[in-house]
Image (spheres, rainbow, N blue to C red):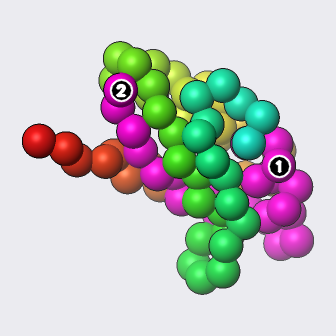
Amino acid sequence: MVEAYVLVQTEVGRADQVASALAELDGVLAADAVTGPYDVVVHVGARPVDDLGALVLGQIAVVPGIVRTVTCTVMRE
């Protein structure tokens, strides 16, 4: 399984709402509202890697309240 962390910036005051919506998506392992430069950190997993792209672009990035995402793929040997 390919795993990644998706760092999410939301509209002001929407972090909890966005985190709750993201937690319901298939492939999302965890979604937490956090402090710092990003508002939500999402741990995702998919198989194969193409499904990871589809998850991020087709399901996560389109959630209302999301302004920007950055995807950080987990590296394993």
Percent coordinates x, y for residue 1 in the rendering: 35, 26
User: Which mark is first along the chain, 1 or 2?
Assistant: 2
Image height of 31 relative to 22, above or below: below
Q: Nearer the viewer, residue 72 or 43?
A: 43
The residue that disc 2 covers is: 1
Percent coordinates x, y for residue 71 in the rendering: 43, 49
In 3D space, how far apart are the residues under numbered discs 2 and 1 (Cα atoms)? 24 Å
Is there any visible trace of residue 51 in the rendered image? Answer: yes
The residue that disc 1 covers is: 20
Circle 2 crowding by C-alpha within 10 Å: few under 14, some 14–19, many from 20: few
Q: Residue at point 46% right, 51% down?
A: 5
Residues at marks 2 and 1 touching, judged by CB atoms closer than 8 Å: no
Where does the magenta region start and end? Answer: 1-22
- Residue type at mark 2: give it: Met
- Residue type at mark 1: give it: Ser
Q: Residue at point 59% right, 51% down?
A: 42
Q: Secondary structure at mark 2?
A: loop
